[in-house]
Image (tube, coloured by chain):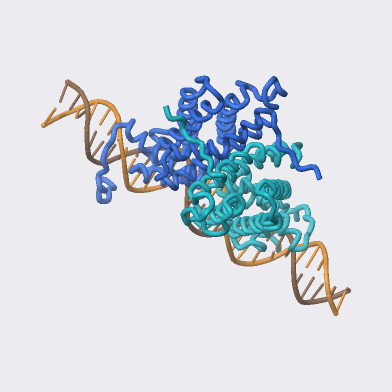
Chain colours: A blue, B cyan, C brown, D orange
Amino acid sequence: MPTNLPPRTPRRRLPAAERRELIEQAAIALFAERGYHGTAIDEIARQAGITPPVLYDHFTSKAALHARLLERTRDELLAMWRQNLGGGGTLEEQLVRAFTAWAAYVQANPYAPRMFFRESTGVEDIKQAHGAIAADANGALAAIIGGLTGSGASADDGGVPATALAMTTEIIRGGLTELAIWWTDHPEIPAEAIVAIAMNTLWLGFERTIGGERWSPPTP
Amino acid sequence: MPTNLPPRTPRRRLPAAERRELIEQAAIALFAERGYHGTAIDEIARQAGITPPVLYDHFTSKAALHARLLERTRDELLAMWRQNLGGGGTLEEQLVRAFTAWAAYVQANPYAPRMFFRESTGVEDIKQAHGAIAADANGALAAIIGGLTGSGASADDGGVPATALAMTTEIIRGGLTELAIWWTDHPEIPAEAIVAIAMNTLWLGFERTIGGERWSPPTP
DNA sequence: TCGATTACCTAGTCACGAGTAGGATATACC
DNA sequence: GGTATATCCTACTCGTGACTAGGTAATCGA
């Protein structure tokens, strides 16, 4: 004698790949919105149209799912950036390309900025992944504006001092992140306007810094 | 017959105000480090040298404790800013004062930037509080660089268009936030260097925007 | 010195969330 | 059409974390 209650509304069955994609889409939106600890597996499953056990057919744990999302969107970010960086040209041209690539990436991955650069958990693995991604982004920026490539710990090898460069990339990354998040609340703004504002606000600033020019407090 | 085990190491007793302060200090550090959901009441209590029931003698709930911290640090931020804003002078002078005030505030409240502008929870009250604080900060910046005071929703009333102004303040706030967080990992950097970098990177940028000058993509 | 107060504790309750066991049924393939 | 496989489910377990009931002892004022 089966222990069944009324057999429920039979849900649409999907092939594994499609269901997995739905789960990832639901998860990235919720993680970005509520953070890692604030998001329950049950919510993700519900959003993906299933129940929790199905989710565990695709991912071994909540942490693994989150790690997979971080890895995936980071790879897309790096690929996008690699495609649009290093093409030579003036500093200004390189910057415009980088900002344009960032805007395109954000349009394709609206939840990425929140997940990467805003969330704060106590889980050590996640923190390390965040740190690595931030370092990648800073490295990409440093390669443009500082003429460096890899480790930024050396003193000043012809370009901008490493510390000043690090501070500058933090400002730029933070500014671009918040601008991107603001954009998700104002989707009517075209990507060109985003790039233009970023150039207007940030461009001349580090042009100065690179040229060795410094602002200094007025000596009274 | 008492049900007691060995009576434990008798802890030092503190007056209520002091214990409350210890709890708030512990809580703000942990919330900033691990986020709201990632922080357990037991951790906060342990860090403050007590057990959870004592914490509930001072705060009615975890949410109330968190709200209290947000309120407290926001008030300090606004007070600090009010003191150092609106003093007249050139735009450059006003900006330097604002950045200097921000640096002093961050030095006194190292966890504030993470708590205010980075954490993401699903709790509606907390999200609203974050939004309100961000709006306050943006308003303060807009008052300086846009010559506006209150609602920024109007079109362009003599100054910078409201939308461009909003985007610019997002970039500046994001940049200053990330710079401040970076600073907490490099406390050897003096406040003057922080202000100088912020000026170098951001100053000329919005000077341009305000002047009505615009960067525009090269027309091929 | 002796209550009264206040700070603090042990030992729980209870809800919620991650993860699992085992079984049912839609779909694909022959 | 009939069988095999893959998709999905119900109904749990078990740990953790917020919060509490009720009591003990240090400290303060008289």
Residues C20 and B187: in front is B187
Q: Which quarter of the figure has residue B50?
A: bottom right
Q: Where does the image place residue C20, in percent across and percent down from the top left?
A: 43, 37
Q: Where does the image place residue A191, in percent across and percent down from the top left?
A: 43, 38
Q: Where does the image place residue B94, in percent across and percent down from the top left?
A: 68, 50
Question: Do we see residue B106 in this rendering?
Answer: no
Q: Where does the image place residue B162, in percent across and percent down from the top left?
A: 50, 51
Relative vertical location of residue A177 with respect to residue B70 in this rendering, above or below: above
* Left or right, residue D5 beside residue A124: left
Residues B160 and A98: in front is B160
Relative vertical location of residue D27 with respect to residue A139 in this rendering, above or below: below
Q: Which residue is drawn at 69% across and 46% down?
A: B96
Question: Do we see residue B124 in this rendering?
Answer: yes
Q: Which residue is drawn at 60% across and 52% down?
A: B137
Residues A139 and B40: in front is A139
Residues B85 and B22: in front is B85
Q: How many numbered discs, if any?
A: 0
Q: Residue at x 65, y 59 (%)?
A: B75
Q: In which quarter of the image is the C terminus of chain A?
A: top right
Q: Which residue is drawn at 67% across and 58% down?
A: B82
* Left or right, residue A21 beside residue C28: right
Relative vertical location of residue A121 with respect to residue B5 in this rendering, above or below: above
